[in-house]
């Protein structure tokens, strides 16, 4: 009798928790330009070359409720059609419950010339998302507890049919990018169809639309030392201030900072948060981000960044560590003329 009452009460609480609409937030990268297809589908093919890359982020490693995110991507530009194509695979594990989300995306973009050194790229992304809370692996149910020895060994439990099973959903996303030799402006909207992410068939919990506005301007600092090759050219030096605004449901953030490029070294520093706009009466301060990267002549780009947490969690949370790697393949015909000489000026980190 006592065991049946425990089961009934616990099941009721579980259904209440999973029955309410819950806000969820997509994972984020501090090196957002090192995850270009994740930021905006319009970046597919932007390098006018074949590119592959990976990103890894470990947030708050000093806490049990940490977040781990991994992405792999690849894209290419089909010059004869002015089309960029790409793929993106992302896996994210959240908190002690072990909620896992795996996303597989196909991406398509098209490039339009609007004027001299002025281009516009719209992009589309179709994604399949699989979410799994690890219900029976990470949670203990009442019928697994022995009433006479509640702190003893966990007993085998009986699965509740249909509760906690993984869910799959389709997401559609769009983006646009306009750029010149030194300026770019991008806008992306993810999950425009707001798919239902609930773990219960009879419940509706829509995935909120994620908006991002990102822009920047590259400022030349003059030529550097001569390159150690036979090109008789000089190393590039420039400073690039950037802004990235994000909003998803009730969550808002602003990344504000810049990159200093002293070929082949890249230094980055920016602030993330909206301190003047609290969330649920809590100050919306997140982190100060420091980054070190290298753009090598071989086409290999490497970056590491650390988020120094300035919210109430403090540095004892462990901050966040992030690593990015990408490789841009050399052109098959290096001397062949291209349809455009304008190179997208945004950083690679």
Image (cartoon, rainbow, N blue to C red):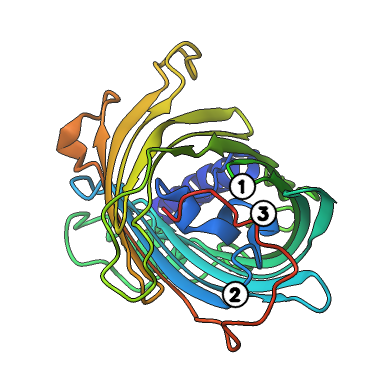
Residue 329 at what x, y percent from top left? 50, 80
Residue 4 at what x, y percent from top left? 47, 55
> Which label was assigned to residue 17?
none
Q: Secondary structure at mark 3?
A: loop
Mark 2 nearby-residue class (10 Å; few <14, some 14–19, many ≥20): some
- Is 164 positioned to the left or the right of 124 in the image? left
**Nearer to me, 285 or 155:** 285
Q: Which residue is mark 2?
A: 49
Q: Which of the 4 image quadrants contains residue 85?
A: bottom right
Mark 1 nearby-residue class (10 Å; few <14, some 14–19, many ≥20): some
- Is 289 positioned to the left or the right of 73 in the image? left
**Nearer to me, 169 or 72:** 72
- Is 184 positioned to the left or the right of 169 in the image? left
Q: Secondary structure at mark 1?
A: loop
Q: Secondary structure at mark 2?
A: loop
Mark 3 nearby-residue class (10 Å; few <14, some 14–19, many ≥20): many
Which of label 2 and label 1 is nearer to you? 1
CA–CA distance between discs 2 and 3?
Answer: 36 Å
Residue farthest front in this picture: 232
> Which label was assigned to residue 181?
1
Tell me if residue 140 can be seen: no
Which of label 1 and label 3 is nearer to you? 1
Tell me if residue 327 can be seen: yes
For marks 1 and 3, the one nearer the N-term is 1
Marks 2/1 in contact by CB < 8 Å: the verdict is no
CA–CA distance between discs 2 and 1?
Answer: 17 Å
Question: Which residue lies at the image location 83% right of the left edge and 75% below the top edge?
Answer: 81
CA–CA distance between discs 1 and 3?
Answer: 41 Å
Residue 297 at what x, y percent from top left? 36, 71
Q: Which of the 4 image quadrants contains residue 312?
A: top left
Question: Which residue lies at the image location 65% right of the left edge and 73% below the top edge?
Answer: 86
Residue 295 at what x, y percent from top left? 35, 63
């Amino acid at each position: 009798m006592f065991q049946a009452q425990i089961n009934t009460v616990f099941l009721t609480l579980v259904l209440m928790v999973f029955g309410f609409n819950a806000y969820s937030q997509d994972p984020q990268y501090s090196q957002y330009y090192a995850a270009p297809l994740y930021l905006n589908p319009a970046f597919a093919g932007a390098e006018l070359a074949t590119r592959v890359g990976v990103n890894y982020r470990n947030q708050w490693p000093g806490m049990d409720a940490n977040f781990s995110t991994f992405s792999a991507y690849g894209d290419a530009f089909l010059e004869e059609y002015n089309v960029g194509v790409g793929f993106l695979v992302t896996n994210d594990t959240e908190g002690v419950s072990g909620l896992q989300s795996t996303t597989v995306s196909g991406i398509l973009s098209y490039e339009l010339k609007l004027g001299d050194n002025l281009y516009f790229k719209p992009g589309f992304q179709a994604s399949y998302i699989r979410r799994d809370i690890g219900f029976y692996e990470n949670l203990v149910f009442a019928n697994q507890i022995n009433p006479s020895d509640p702190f003893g060994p966990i007993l085998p439990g009986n699965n509740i049919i249909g509760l906690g099973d993984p869910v799959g959903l389709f997401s559609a996303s769009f983006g646009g990018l306009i750029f010149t030799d030194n300026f770019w402006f991008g806008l992306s909207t993810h999950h425009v169809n707001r798919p239902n992410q609930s773990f219960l068939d009879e419940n509706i919990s829509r995935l909120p639309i994620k908006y991002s506005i990102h822009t920047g301007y590259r400022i030349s600092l003059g030529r550097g030392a001569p390159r150690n090759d036979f090109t008789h050219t000089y190393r590039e030096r420039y400073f690039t201030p950037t802004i990235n605004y994000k909003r998803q449901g009730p969550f808002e953030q602003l990344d504000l900072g810049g990159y200093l490029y002293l070929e082949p070294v890249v230094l980055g520093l920016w602030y993330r948060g909206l301190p003047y706009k609290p969330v649920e009466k809590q100050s919306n301060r997140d982190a100060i981000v420091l980054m070190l990267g290298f753009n090598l002549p071989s086409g290999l780009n490497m970056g590491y960044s650390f988020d120094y947490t300035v919210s109430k969690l403090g540095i004892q949370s462990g901050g966040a560590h992030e690593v990015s790697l990408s490789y841009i393949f050399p052109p098959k015909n290096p001397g062949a003329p291209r349809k455009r000489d304008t190179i997208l000026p945004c950083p690679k980190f």
